[in-house]
Image: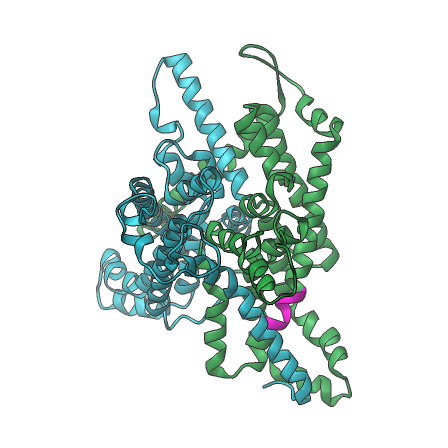
Chain colours: A green, B cyan
Amino acid sequence: MMQKDIKRLSLILLFAPFALWIFLLIVLPHLGMFYISVREKVGPRMYEFGLGNYINFFAEPIYWNTLIRTGSMSLLVTALALLLGFPIAYYIAKIAGNRTRGALFLMCLIPLWVSDLIRAFGWILLLRETGIISSSLQWAGVINTPIEFLYNDAAVIMGLVYTVILFMIVPLVSTLDGMDNSMIEAGYNLGGNGPTVLRRIIIPYAMPGIVSGCIVVFMLTAGSYLTPILLGGKNSSWFTEQIYDQFITRYNWESGAAFGFLLLAFTSLVVWGGLKLSGQTLNSTVAKS
Amino acid sequence: MAIKPNTAFLTSYRIYVAAFFVFLAAPLVAAGMFAFNDSLFPSLPWQGFTLDWFFNDTEPKLGMFHDRRLLRGLYYSFVIASFVSLLSVFVGTCNAFLFVRCRFPAKDFFYIMMVLPLVIPGVILGISILLLASNIANGAEEALSLDLDFLRPGLILVVLGQFSFITTITSLVIIARLKKFDESMEEAAFNLGASRVRVLRTITLPFLFPAMAAAGIVAFLVSFENFNTTLFLVGSEAPLTITMYDRMVKVGSTPVLNAVSFFLMVGSALLALISILVNRDKPQT
């Protein structure tokens, strides 16, 4: 009896901080944001329920175009991160020797500990008109006049891939690490060549890692703010910029909240679609315990 | 080695891997090296080595250690990061015990709720907390004419905003460690007559300590470098990343920003190294 009471008491004591955290800082703010997004201002300090903020969003092409642009560019970044990151993860997990493996993995993590701001700043110094790449090319005689590499979509995509690729590599390395080498050898012994083994054995095995990396990378990209602004300049039109604009510049909290909710809904929808397509669940990937 | 591909393939593979690491290092090197260039602009040509951007005390080459606003930013970042890491390690440890040791209904659902903050865009987290806090503060002012100053943008909201997603990180790190704990050690201590509190203090917590320390350092670093969530919640006490961004947008890039970048990179590298050494025997997850 006593034992049972202690168990229950400790469960309550342990659950309390968790519940306070999730409820007060995650659930309640999002409910509040939803509530604000479905009210319309009809006069000073007068509000009534309505979907006007959402209708506004769909009525103004510039808004939903920005969201679609953000979404498709984020998908492109995710695909690029996977394509570029997979060989690196495979190299670290399967080809590198035991000692280089740890060092390479650590090197992958180094940019993670550096602020977004500093990484973007570094790219600006490299890419701008008076930057390192432009002046080196001039010095080498390849070009005659300085070239501006910044403020275009390619710079934004590259900067974003750079920022998020670690979140692709890390889950991939840990999934591939758990794969038994004999599975790959068996594939070869049965007469498969490199591409077949990759397609039929390695990729299916790594699927949970791939999906988990893709989800995190996609969410981080779609929600990023600093990299598109700094590398893309004023016209990068990223959706988080629109949200910031509604909140801070126009002081229109109702519509800003609606935009925030749309971003959340849109990215969740994409993630849900990706999970359905790949036949994975949230439990088997990101929330793997 | 799993497969033995032909050497030409392996060589080009190696070149690709090397090129990738050059790509990873390039912007960091660029951001760091101009801290030592004796010029007013962070760009080539190289004008010679100097430490002025750290230590010089006169304009126009005001070094970072004499720049009041940057130093204040550094101080606020430090305060915020300390609070965030203490709070998030505490809640993370509770979460670890909750999810590893306890059985309760809908545990899988709550586990997903715990991981969720990591994938919510930082901008949205910041906005939603700002909205809720402001609405409560406004409501309290109108209805009760109470002035709830702590709910206005400022240090406390920044700490809460960062805490809201950093706790997921600390929880995951500590959960991974607690799962490796052999519960028979606790049982042995119980059998020898130790009390619950004593077992926790002398056996379980010392086992968890490396993970808690590592999680604390990670939380500190993530808080220090956070921008997206902080941007919306910041009041007059701007942490370093916000100060730097302001400077970059208003004044343009000056080498003092490179000096700060270099300082931060070295600082985080050292802390990251410590966290890895502390948490050594835990395999990478």
Query: Of B168 and A78, which appears nearest the observer?
Result: A78
Q: Quadrant of the N terminus of chain B?
A: bottom right
Q: Position of residue A180 (x, y in %)?
A: 60, 80
Magenta segment, which residues? A83-88
Numbered marks: total: 0
For the question of whether residue B148 can be seen, the reply is yes
For the question of whether residue A284 can be seen, the reply is no
Say whether residue A52 is left or right of residue B99: right
Q: Position of residue A209 (x, y in %)?
A: 61, 64
Q: Position of residue A161 (x, y in %)?
A: 61, 57
The dominant secondary structure in magenta is helix
Say whether residue B176 is left or right of residue A212: left
Vertical arrangement, residue B120 with respect to residue A80, above or below: above
Q: Position of residue B161 (x, y in %)?
A: 43, 39
Query: Of B273 and B33, which appears nearest the observer?
Result: B33
| Residue at horizontal 67 percent and vertical 44 percent from the top | A70
Residue A258 on the magenta span: no
| Residue at horizontal 64 percent and vertical 84 percent from the top | B10
Quarter of the image holding residue A44?
Answer: top right
Vertical arrangement, residue B137 with respect to residue B220, above or below: above
Quarter of the image holding residue A184?
Answer: bottom right
Vertical arrangement, residue A56 with respect to residue B82, above or below: above
